[in-house]
Image (spheres, rainbow, N blue to C red):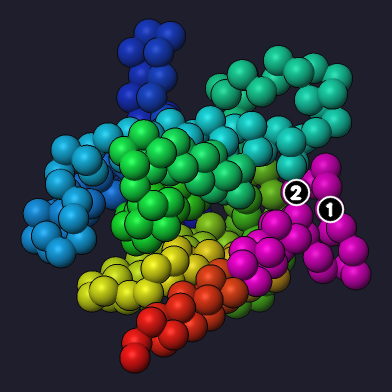
Amino acid sequence: MLTYPEIDPVAIAIGPVAVRWYGLAYVAGIGIGWWLGRRRAAREPWRGWTPPQVDDLVFHFALGAVLGGRIGYVLFYDFSRFLADPLVVVRIWEGGMSFHGGLLGAVAAAAWFARRHRLGFFLVSDFLAPLVPPGLGAGRIGNFVNGELWGKPADVSWAMVFPGAGPQPRHPSQLYEAGLEGLALFAILWWFSRRPRPRMAVSGLFLAGYGAARCLVELAREPDVHLGYLALGWLTMGQLLSVPMVLAGTAMLWWGRRARDEAVP
């Protein structure tokens, strides 16, 4: 069993103002994605992107992801509380962000950006998809520092006792997600997108890859206490929301490949 490194969730406190590691993780993730996007735009001119366009895209993406993440959490994971107190959606200091809500917000922002710049939606999403996993990984590290979203009880040698989760050692599922949704998914997408691919293929691989990774890690993650398992004694809300991603991503990969093959004489 490993010892959980109890890190103060507050990185910097000046009077009543506190900056938390979780917030810094979001800033770091967005910053890394922005840097990668500018680097790719400058070094791979065949994509047709310019660094100033990347600046504008990342701004739209960050705004959509944060707003969607908060709204999605309230609607997907805390809807009964929202019905009783609709203003909970703006009390972001109480915590609660949803990846799937953030994804919907990012999709809406990408669509707005594409319309504004008269670009195809999948041209935008295919460029954006490889820039997202570093932020996902950073966010999961933030969850680990906060000691939240822990895993199920386990007897593996790397299990940890999380504060507030009882005396049982548990899977550090936050680190599993950081490794799969962050590091592994980034490596796959960055490699896959280094050369021209069929339209929507990169976006499809992102959806399928994230959905599969999330479904897998949810098997080792403790479900939200107020939701529990939705069915069969193992199905979680995270899995329910991720299965459509796997299906949609697989379909997009197939459609993209088929369209390319039909275009080749």
- Residue 188, located in which quarter of the rendered image? bottom left
Q: Left or right of 122: which side holds 247?
A: right
* Residue in front for this viewpoint, 175 or 258: 258
Q: Is residue 220 magenta?
A: no
- Residue 43, located in which quarter of the rendered image? bottom left
* Residue in front for this viewpoint, 131 or 229: 131
Q: Which residue is mark 1?
A: 228
Q: Where does residue 92 sit, x and y in percent of width and height?
A: 57, 24
Q: Is residue 92 visible?
A: yes
Q: Is residue 247 magenta?
A: yes
Which residue is farthest top? Answer: 15
- Callout 1: helix, strand or loop? loop
Instruction: Give the vertical position of 16 relative to 13 (above or below).
Output: above
Q: Residue at x 90, y 64 (%)?
A: 231
Amino acid tagged 2: Asp
Numbered circles on residues, count? 2
* Residue in front for this viewpoint, 154 or 86: 86
Which corner quadrant holds the N terminus? bottom right
What separation in Å lies between label 2 and label 1 (alpha carbons)?
6 Å
Confirm or deny contact between disc 2 and disc 1 (CB under 8 A). Answer: yes
Which residue is farthest front? Answer: 265
Q: Residue at x 64, y 32 (%)?
A: 71
Q: Determine which of the numbered discs, if any, sits on residue 224 in the image.
A: 2
Instruction: Give the vertical position of 55 relative to 243 (above or below).
Output: above
Q: Residue at x 56, y 22 (%)?
A: 93
Q: Residue at x 61, y 19 (%)?
A: 90
Residue neighbourhood size for the residue with mark 2, other residues' Cα within 10 Å, grouped as few (<14), some (14–19), many (≥20) = some
- Residue 21, located in which quarter of the rendered image? top left
The span shown in magenta is 221-248
- Callout 2: helix, strand or loop? loop
Amino acid tagged 1: Gly
Q: Is residue 158 visible?
A: no
